[in-house]
Image (tube, helix red, strand yellow):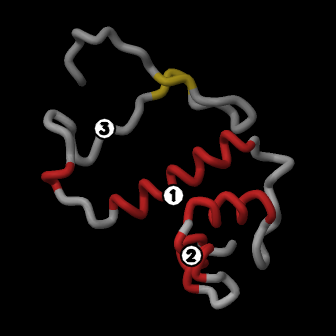
């Protein structure tokens, strides 16, 4: 799989495309790049933009410090607990707990 983060360094990309990384990522997910196939028929545009936002959040978080974390947020965050894991064809069901209940 092609690493999306390194694509901006590829000489095939123009400066204009490199300056607008979000559109580049969206275009790559939509049309493919190199060995990576296109996912336009499998991933809806809204979900493609969500993937782009997630990639950008990961990129921006690389230089984050503990001071950037909102007050009261544990670092790292607690992993979700599942009532049912799902089968791969179904989504997992996340445990729900009352807001006043303390974490276990």
Q: Which residue is mark 1?
A: 55
Label 1 close to label 2 by CB (< 8 Å): no
In the figure, 62 relative to 42: above or below? Answer: below
Cα–Cα gap, marks 2 and 3:
35 Å
**Earlier sequence position, callout 1 versus callout 3:** 1
Q: Residue furthest right?
A: 41
Q: Residue at x 50, y 21 (%)?
A: 83
Left or right of 86, for residue 56: left
- Expressed as whole percent of the image width and height from the top left, the position of residue 76 reads 26, 47
Cα–Cα gap, marks 1 and 3:
21 Å
Between label 1 and label 2, give the one nearer the viewer. Answer: 2
Q: Residue furthest front?
A: 16
- Expressed as whole percent of the image width and height from the top left, the position of residue 41 reads 86, 48
Between label 1 and label 3, give the one nearer the viewer. Answer: 1
Sort mark 2 into few (<14), some (14-19) or many (20+) by Cα contacts within 10 Å: some
Label 1 close to label 3 by CB (< 8 Å): no
Q: Which residue is mark 3?
A: 78
Left or right of 13, for residue 37: right
Q: Residue at x 57, y 31 (%)?
A: 85
Name the image quarter holding residue 23.
Answer: bottom right
Q: Residue at x 19, y 59 (%)?
A: 65
**Earlier sequence position, callout 1 versus callout 2:** 2
Q: Which residue is mark 2?
A: 18
């Amino acid at each position: 799989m092609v690493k999306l983060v390194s694509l901006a360094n590829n000489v095939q990309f123009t400066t204009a495309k490199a300056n607008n990384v979000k559109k580049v990522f969206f275009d790559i997910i939509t049309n493919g790049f190199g060995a990576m196939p296109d996912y336009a028929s499998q991933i809806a545009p809204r979900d493609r933009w969500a993937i782009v936002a997630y990639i950008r959040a990961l990129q921006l978080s690389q230089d984050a410090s503990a001071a950037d974390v909102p007050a009261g947020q544990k670092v790292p965050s607690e992993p979700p607990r599942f009532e049912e894991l799902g089968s791969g064809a179904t989504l997992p069901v996340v445990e729900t707990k009352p807001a006043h209940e303390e974490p276990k």
